Image (cartoon, rainbow, N blue to C red):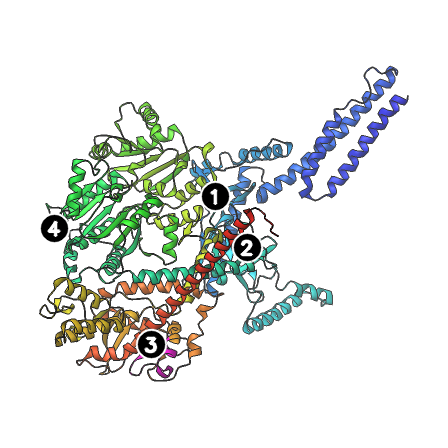
Amino acid sequence: MKHLSSRKCMSLLLLLILNTSKAFINSVPSNRRQLDTQLYAEIRRNTQITFGSDQSTDGSDEEEEFVRERAERDAIIESVLKEQDEEFKEERRKKRWGQFADAKTKEDILKVEEKIKEEVAVENKKKAALAQTQGVDLEVLDPVDTAISDDNGNIQIKAATAANWYNQVDEELKEEWDALESGKEDAKAADGQDDTPDTIEVDGKIVSRDTLQGVRVGSAGGWSLEVFPGDFVVHRKYGIGRFERTCLRSKTKLTEEEKEARDKRRSELLTIELKKVAGGVTPAQMKEIQARFGTEEDTDPISNPQSTVLEISYADGIVHVPVDRAYRLSRYRSGDAAVKPKLSKVRGDAWRNARRKVEESTLELAQDVLALYATRETLQRHPFDPSKEDEVKDFGTSFKFEPTQDQKKCFEDVENDMVWRTRPMDRLICGDVGFGKTEIAMRALYRAVSNGRQAVFLAPTGVLASQHFKNVVKRMGEDTKYGKKIALLRGGMGKTSKAGKELRRQISQGEVEIIVGTHALLSRDMAYKDLGLLVVDEEQRFGVKQKERLKVIYDGIDVLTLSATPIPRTLQMSLSGIRDTSTLRSPPPMRKPTITYVQDFNKDIVKLAIQQELDRGGQCYYVVPRIALLDDAEEMILECFPDIRVIQAHGRMGRTTAEDNVSDFAEGGYDVLLATTVIENGVDIPTVNTIIIQDSQNFGMSTLYQLRGRVGRSDLQGYSYFLHREESITEQAAMRLQAIGELNELGSGFDVANRDLEIRGAGSLLGTEQSGVAMRVGFDLYMRMLKKSIRQLRGLDLPLVPRTNIILPKNQGSLSGDNASSLLSIPEDYMPDENERMTAESSARLAESSAKLVQLTNEWKKAYGAMPASLQTKLKTLHLHASTRRLGIDLIGLVDNGDGTTDCIMRSPGLRPRHLGLILPLLPKGLPVRGVDVVFPERFAKVDGVDEVQGGKKVDLKGLLDDPSLDDDSDNWDALDEEEIEAMKDISSAFEVKSMDDVDVEQYPRFVMKDFGTGGKAVDRILQVLLPYAKVVLEKQESDKDSAKAAAELRERRELVRLKKKVADKKNENSPFMMTE
């Protein structure tokens, strides 16, 4: 009996535990359910325990009673567990399915989807309307896939997890959902609807795609922000957060008028509600009605004014940012974007401290940048002759296409660098593949050789060098009317070979004018007679050591770099203003964006892609990452198409073999070119409009983008297939492929480079590691802070104008035009030596100030005697141009006021009131120069709405300097960048102006000489009023440069002292301990 009692006791104890656990489970919150699963598992194991021995000594009646009791106990346990399982599964269903939890059929899902669509559409319309009242444009963006597309679906990169009962429940729910969804998309397609799935799984939850819509907000001031749910953003005040959604919220800050209107409207609504209640209301009912005001139940727009906000999650809370304050946000782009950033805390000083440290770092870097500016300005070289520009324009007519507007701007940028500046050109041309970068290089090459200088065209591969050589010969070779001597130097033409030795001799003696080549041009034995220009194509393909070699060999000459996707460091230098950059964004006519597929590798996809191209009579590229994969790929292609014609090209083929194979393919002799990345650049075959890239996860973003650019170069639709292997894909590879799939519009090369910068990081700038600093605040905010530091240190940041277009009667003051006499020409009988004369003319033409011109003319007088009167007249014009360049004046002309008076207008697109506030205190008595007024458009007016500073009259300097754009919490810092960009566009286009009637001068800052008349001596009169301004601007800018340079040098010395002390301390620590008496 004792044995039986122990069994009963154990059974009763287990039932007691079970009932207690059930009560506990029902009392705990849902987020503790994982603990429940462990308890269930323990109970399940307990049911398998056999209490006592099967060889019981008790009678059969007792044994039967035990079996019956155990069966009853097991039944109770199973019932409880089943009940709990169903409860948990239902709760899990609600959590995972969300708004779709009650759906039982696919029709139910469609109804919920339609309801969500309608609600989202109505709310989006309301959000956009409210945003407009806040002065912001709001555009809703279609949701984007958050992973790599596979058959237009998603492939998620997930770590493996062990199977457990918890996951089994989720798997059952997934199977249920798939069963409900099956056939829904086919039914929609049959009805003519878009068959794109309306639902998507995000973080384990089923949500409508409409709830994942992104948003683009911006204002006329120039700032803009584009974000999608889940994107990390940086708020200047609160730090790094995660964007969740846009929503409507009651306005917390109302104007007095809005408060008055709100109170009045609530009184009206209260009266209406009271009239609805018969017999009067109690005080409690009155309070209940009033309590609804300002809540979600209050839908009256006057009683409860709302605004559109961006909801941002932080580590310790949620912040709602009104869209009219969205300029305070920027996308988070770190130096290591593969690692998700840690969300900031709204409370506490952690973000403020991190930002302060970054500001200190950017201030130091800004000093280095300005020191670099000062150093660059000291570099001098002989500029190219402006009188040769007519020949360059004639050469431009041989271009068989009409240049785009972006190309025209680039032509002028390069001309300004080569002809109108004394420091060597170092310009990056960033443009999409096929957008016309080569034509810009062609005209620069011709300019160099037409000036009697040599030019080098450097390419990273033999295929690309061969392509460039053919194009240059075709445009300006010996068989053309231009008759230039061009040569190709490539691998195999070493200094010991007969051909290489002879070509090097011709180059050194100046018999060859343009040299096209690959890395052979970087050899130490290269010598030139008079090298004037280096063009580097696809600079991202050259390594660090090769670029350092370029700096040594080609130091002091003009350098023009071409790239569709510049490397992150180059892009960062461009964005920060360290390197001059021109961008081509306008596509050629008739070009179509290439359709891009990013999919897991599948032989059937390869077969379908090739067959589709062959059916329309085209050809295909098939690219692999390694030479060893070529034969296997060819075997697979031949297995699919036994009669297809395939030819290979790779870098280890015999001399010229790869180029010859590409040429044979281009002539139509083959259907598929199977190659490595040797075809990445320079291959332009209009009949090839399909490219398949195998193992695309192994390529860099720039290479992927360049390869896609090989197709779609005609008016035919291009197709690119990026095939990858899921088991080999890494986090960064996934990000690259996602980016290449998303950025498929024409002209997106700069955006691809920006995304590469986001993924890979900024790297090293000016020899110092900045990516770690940038990661603390995100790259966008970091670059904004750097630009701000540079602008503050520069102070007087007037843009320097390369040349001024002066449109005055009788060609007064002009240095260009159809009349060659407008250019400075020193008489031969005054300065007989031709070389000295050319050097003197260039030095005077590009003198940075009147003081420099005076110094030059004094030297001439000392060496050659008194100057002729004609030369003195020309020098006055040079004094004027030195002043206008310094003041940012790009256009001068006369404007008829219609009342019998004529004003002289001097346009200065980059001039701002803050500049004038810094200039005026430096003038005599702190007064504006008499005889000339400074006028600003209304949008720039700072002094009590007054937009004009009159010459000779006292000005409120505090009002001029009190510039909201200097407020860190203002969007005007960002607007400043846009203003600078627009100002430089106006400056670049100034020489296209033929008459002042072509310009709306009221829209620009300007110097105005009223009632100027149309008489003579215009140059003298203008120079008289501009010279004082130009003098103080030069002195201030030089002082700012010297200060930044001194600060940088001081910091370097301190760092050197610190390092020496550190070495000395370490040496003392390692020295043996000695004691002396």
Q: Residue visible at 74% across and 33% down?
A: 80
SS at circle 3: strand
Q: Looking at this rendering, what residue extends furthest in the front direction?
A: 1077
Q: Are marks 1 and 4 in contact (CB under 8 Å)?
A: no
Q: Between tags 2 and 4, which lies in front?
A: 4
SS at circle 2: strand
Q: Position of residue 581 (x, y in %)?
A: 32, 56
SS at circle 4: loop
Q: Nearer the viewer, residue 323 or 83?
A: 323
Q: Between tags 1 and 4, which lies in front?
A: 4
Which badge, 4 or 3, is on the more N-terminal residue? 4
Q: Position of residue 220 (x, y in %)?
A: 40, 64
What label does residue 312 carry, if any? 2
**Is residue 56 shown above or below 438?**
above
**Is residue 221 shown above or below 473?**
below
Q: Is residue 1062 left or right of residue 865?
A: right
Q: Residue visible at 35% across and 48% down?
A: 566
Determine if residue 365 is in view.
Answer: yes
The CA distance from mark 1 to mark 2 is 19 Å
Q: Are marks 3 and 1 in contact (CB under 8 Å)?
A: no
Which badge, 2 or 4, is on the more N-terminal residue? 2
Residue placed under numbered mark 1 in the picture = 146
Q: Are marks 4 and 3 in contact (CB under 8 Å)?
A: no
Residue placed under numbered mark 3 in the picture = 935
Under mark 2, the amino acid is: Ile
Q: Which residues are magenta?
A: 919-934
Residue placed under numbered mark 4 in the picture = 482
* Mark 3 neighbour class, 10 Å CA radius: few under 14, some 14 to 19, many 20 or more: many
Which badge, 1 or 2, is on the more N-terminal residue? 1
